[in-house]
Image: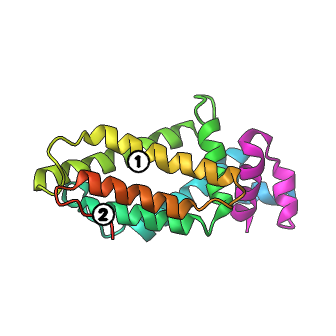
Amino acid sequence: MITESAVEHFAQWGYHNASLPKIAAAVGISPAGLLHHFGSKRELLMAVLQARAEHAAKTFYEGMGEPDGLDALEMLRRMAAQTEFNLTQPGLVQMYAVLSAEAANPEHPAHAYFRERYDTIRGRVERTLRHGVGSGLLHEDVDCAAVAREILAVSDGFQVQWAMSDGRWDMLGAYRGYVDRLARTLTRSGHGID
């Protein structure tokens, strides 16, 4: 309830311009009631971001094992599945697009969160790709660090473009096409994600 309202407000106005009284009014409680649940706007923001991260980890990446043993094609399939899920949560997609750009400022309350998130995801993807190279699934000359950064850049860039199209652009089709082409380029066998 409160976090869903916060997502909508953070997505539309960003962190600095979102209003706690408006978030509280949207769920029918007083600003004091909102602060009873979350001590500050910063705590509310962090609760929203943490809940989203936990959901993604549990839904898409639980049971995948350590990146050093994960199949690179399975990782790309799960990334496409997460993109499909994200389309059912348009407010979250827009919120992440807005907040990740705002959080480039070291003074932003979510700066450390986004820095850690990018470092963690990039590191996991890079280690998975390195495992794929080591196991012979991927070509030996794959620049795993560069590909990991590319995957994140494409994912985030597609989310911004989707948000700018008011959800009319086929982000899922574009992303699935991208990871399939990437897989065909990286794998020795030329297999895609399907």
Viewer-nearest residue: 10 or 175: 175
Q: Amino acid at mark 2?
A: Gly
Q: Is 180 part of what is drawn in magenta?
A: no
Instruction: Tell whether 1 sits left or right of 153.
Output: right
According to the image, label 1 marks what residue? 151
Viewer-nearest residue: 13 or 28: 13
Quadrant position of residue 99: top right
* Prevailing secondary structure of the magenta residues: helix
- Under circle 2, the secondary element is loop
The 10 Å Cα crowd at callout 1, few under 14, some 14 to 19, many 20 or more, is some
Residue extent of the magenta highlight: 1-29
Q: Is 9 part of what is drawn in magenta?
A: yes
Find residue 173 and report its horizontal and vertical position in percent. Answer: 51, 64
- Under circle 1, the secondary element is helix
Q: Quadrant of the C terminus?
A: bottom left
Vertical position of residue 74 compared to residue 44: above or below? below
Q: Earlier in the sequence, mark 1 or mark 2?
A: 1
Q: Amino acid at mark 1?
A: Ile
Residue depicted at x 61% and y 38%: 101
Find residue 180 and report its horizontal and vertical position in percent. Answer: 36, 60
Instruction: Tell whether 40 sits left or right of 57.
Output: right
Residue depicted at x 73% and y 69%: 1
Res. 44 visible in picture? no
The number of numbered badges drawn on the structure is 2
Find residue 60 and report its horizontal and vertical position in percent. Answer: 41, 67
